[in-house]
Image: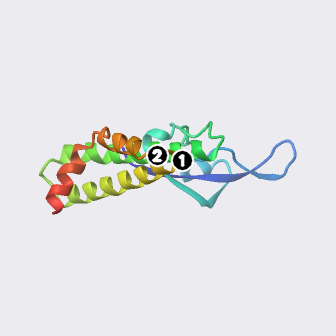
C-alpha cells in the first residue's frame, strides 16, 4: 500500500451550467476526466481509502469537525500500518529504507496521537490507544535509532 494524494475538483453542473466544487475528493488521474483539481485541497491518504475509480471512499459521512479528526486519525494509522508491513517485508535487506520507514511510522503515530488527544480529554484513554497500536516496528525503530 502507498500514500495517494486526493483533491476536490471543480465541475460544471449539468442542470445549471455553473461551475461548482465536487463533494468528494479524487486522484488527479480520476479528476482529469471530470474537471479541474483544486490543488489547495490536497489530502494524503492511504491507497486502501481510494476505490478503483480513484475516488476517496473513507470520508463520505463526515458531518462534523470531530468526524473529520477521526477520519484523519484512521488515515494516519493506516499509513503507519502500511509502512510497518513494508518494513517487516524488508527485514534487514535494506537497512537505509527500513530506517526511513521506521522514522515515518513514528511521525505518523505521533500525529495520530496528538489528534486523538484533541478528541479525548482523558489522558489514560490516549495511553491505552498507544499501547494497543500493535506497531512493533516502532519499538525496534526507536531502539535502533538510539
- The total number of labels drawn is 2
How dense is the environment of label 2, judged by Cα within 10 Å: few (below 14), some, or many (20 and up)? Answer: many
Residue drawn at (20%, 49%) of the image: 139
How dense is the environment of label 1, judged by Cα within 10 Å: few (below 14), some, or many (20 and up)? Answer: some
Residue drawn at (15%, 56%) of the image: 143
Q: In screen coordinates, is 90 left or right of 72?
A: left
Q: Do the residues labelled 1 and 2 touch (CB within 8 Å)?
A: yes
Q: In screen coordinates, is 14 left or right of 59?
A: right
Q: Nearer the viewer, residue 76 or 125?
A: 125
Q: Name the residue under label 2.
A: 73
Q: Which of 5 and 32 is in front in this view?
A: 5
Residue drawn at (64%, 52%) of the image: 8
Vertical order, 133 against 12 (above or below): above
Q: Which of 31 and 121 is in front in this view?
A: 121
Q: Mark 1 points at which residue?
A: 69
Which quadrant does the N terminus fall into? top left
Q: In screen coordinates, is 38 left or right of 80?
A: right
Residue drawn at (45%, 42%) of the image: 74
Which quadrant does the C terminus fall into? bottom left
Residue 77 spot, x, y in % from top left:
39, 44
Q: Disc 1 versus disc 2: distance between alpha carbons?
A: 6 Å
Q: Which colour scheme is used?
A: rainbow
Does any portion of residue 32 appear in the rendered image? Answer: no
Residue 91 spot, x, y in % from top left:
15, 47
Amino acid at each position: 500500500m502507498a500514500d495517494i494524494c486526493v483533491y476536490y475538483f471543480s465541475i460544471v453542473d449539468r442542470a445549471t451550467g455553473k461551475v461548482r466544487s465536487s463533494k468528494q475528493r479524487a486522484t488527479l488521474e480520476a479528476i482529469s476526466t471530470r474537471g479541474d483539481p483544486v490543488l489547495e485541497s490536497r489530502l494524503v491518504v492511504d491507497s486502501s481509502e481510494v476505490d478503483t475509480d480513484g475516488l476517496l471512499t473513507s470520508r463520505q459521512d463526515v458531518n462534523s469537525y470531530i468526524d473529520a479528526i477521526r477520519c484523519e486519525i484512521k488515515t494516519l494509522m493506516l499509513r503507519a500500518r502500511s509502512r510497518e508491513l513494508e518494513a517487516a517485508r524488508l527485514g534487514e535487506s535494506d537497512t537505509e529504507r527500513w530506517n526511513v520507514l521506521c522514522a515515518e511510522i513514528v511521525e505518523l503515530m505521533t500525529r495520530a496521537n496528538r489528534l486523538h488527544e484533541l478528541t479525548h480529554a482523558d489522558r489514560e484513554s490516549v495511553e491505552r490507544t498507544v499501547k494497543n497500536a500493535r506497531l512493533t516496528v516502532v519499538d525496534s525503530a526507536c531502539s535502533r535509532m538510539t
